[in-house]
Amino acid sequence: MVERYYNEKGELAVLISYRGGWSTCYGEALAYDRRIIEYWLNESTSIKDLKKFVRALGYDEVFIDSDDDLAIVYIPAGTMFCITEYDGCESIQTPKTLGMQIA
């Protein structure tokens, strides 16, 4: 299990891709790994740099087209959610956005 990154408000940072299936194709740990989030926030948002960094951490090769493919979404603590993907575009879904009901 990877260590996760929480901001000063206690929200979980989740790195998702709008065009490449970042974590849904290559493993959910990529979306939550504190080291990757901190690198993206503090070091570089260059995809070329990030790919090198991710490989150095021991992850397999990942495919991302351009720098604007990735974005960090903050999830309030205690929120039930999942990362979904449709045609390469990842999004965050909650019971409410999925229209879930209680029996």
Image (cartoon, grey):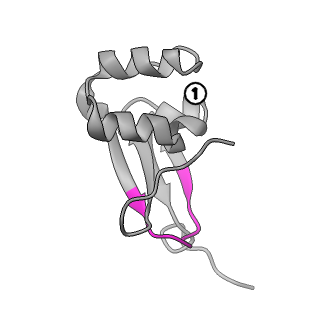
Q: Residue 70 occupies which quadrant of the picture?
A: top left
Q: Is residue 73 among what the camera can see?
A: yes
Which residue of the protein is positioned furthest toward the right in this rendering? Answer: 103
Number of numbered markers: 1
| Residue at the image point whose x is 45% and y is 33% from the top | 88
Q: At which x and y percent is residue 63?
A: 44, 19
Quarter of the image for the N terminus: give it.
top right
Q: Which type of secondary structure does the marked residue at label 1 adopt? A: helix
Quarter of the image for the C terminus: give it.
bottom right
Residue placed most toward the observer, 95 or 67: 67
- Whether residue 27 appears in magenta in the rendering, the answer is no
Residue placed most toward the observer, 72 or 42: 42
| Residue at the image point whose x is 48% and y is 22% from the top | 54
Which residue of the protein is positioned furthest toward the bottom in this rendering? Answer: 103
> Principal SS element in the magenta part?
loop
Q: At which x and y percent is residue 72?
A: 35, 47
Q: Residue 2 occupies which quadrant of the picture?
A: top right
- Whether residue 76 appears in magenta in the rendering, the answer is yes
Residue under label 1, please give it. 26
Q: Is residue 17 among what the camera can see?
A: no
Q: At which x and y percent is residue 22?
A: 47, 32
Q: At which x and y percent is residue 31?
A: 50, 41
Residue placed most toward the observer, 39 or 72: 39
Chain part drawn in magenta: 74-83
Q: Is residue 13 above or below residue 35?
A: below
Residue placed most toward the observer, 78 or 90: 78
Q: Residues within 10 Å of mark 1 (few under 14, many from 20)?
A: some
Q: Is residue 44 above or below residue 10?
A: above
Q: Is residue 62 above or below residue 40?
A: above
Q: Is residue 70 left or right of residue 58?
A: left
Q: Mark 1 is on which residue type?
A: Tyr
